[in-house]
Amino acid sequence: MSRLVRTIALALALASTPACASLRSPVPAYTSVEQSAFALMGAYALTLDQATTLIGDPVTPRAVKMALAEAEKRATPAVELVKIAAIAHSRARHSATSAALARALTEAQPPAQALAALVGR
């Protein structure tokens, strides 16, 4: 797919889901911890795609590529933990799983936001 078509598709997707359009604050737009978790995961997926594109671009400076790789190394495990906690909570619907999901979400936000800042989102 051409870069222009990808850009237009991404712009349309972001325009149709404004709360997920920015990783910096998708969480306050939602009322439940589940919604916040899925917003974070969706926004992180978009950020990770952008980071992958930047890393693969030959004109991206090596220092930027290294910083992106390091930020991704910190953020991905935290976001994966949110995913696991969200799945557990959706299956059990118990206050303990809700608390675990809330903790995972709180811990995942700073590294995910750091990666988003490097990508320029």
Image (tube, grey):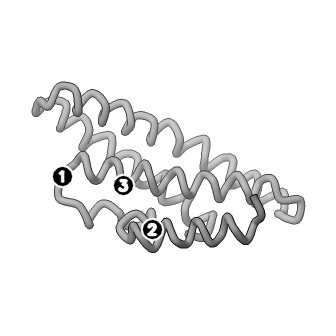
Q: How many marks?
A: 3
Estimate how packed mark 1 is, as few (under 14), some (14 to 19) or many (20 or more) residues with alpha carbons within 10 Å.
few
Instruction: Inspect the image, locate mark 1, and give the three-letter code of the amino acid beneath it.
Output: Ser
Residue name at image x 23 percent, y 33 percent:
90
What residue sits 75% from the left and 51% below the top?
66
Q: Are marks 3 and 2 in contact (CB under 8 Å)?
A: no
- Judging by the rendered image, the residue that carries numbered circle 1 is 32
Which numbered tag is attached to residue 21? Answer: 2
Q: Quadrant of residue 100?
A: top left
In this picture, is 88 found above or below 71? above
Kindly report the distance in space between the C-alpha atoms of the residues bearing marks 1 and 3.
11 Å
Q: Is residue 34 left or right of residue 57?
A: left
- Identify the image quadrant of residue 29: bottom left
| Mark closest to the chain's N terminus, 3 or 2 | 2
The amino acid at mark 3 is Ala
- Tell me which numbered mark, 2 or 1, is placed earlier along the sequence: 2
* In the foreground, 93 or 63: 93
Q: Quadrant of the N terminus?
A: bottom right
Label 2 sits on what residue type?
A: Ala
Tag 3 secondary structure: helix
Distance between the Cα atoms at labels 2 and 1?
Answer: 18 Å
Q: Which mark is residue 39?
A: 3
Q: Hey, which quadrant is residue 99 in on the image?
A: top left
Distance, label 3 to label 2, CA atoms, is 9 Å
Q: Residue furthest left?
A: 95
Q: Pointer 1 and pointer 3: residues touching (CB < 8 Å)? A: no
Q: Which mark is residue 80?
A: none
For label 2, the crowd category at 10 Å Cα-Cα, with few meaning under 14, some 14 to 19 and many 20 or more, is many
Q: Is residue 102 above or below residue 4?
A: above
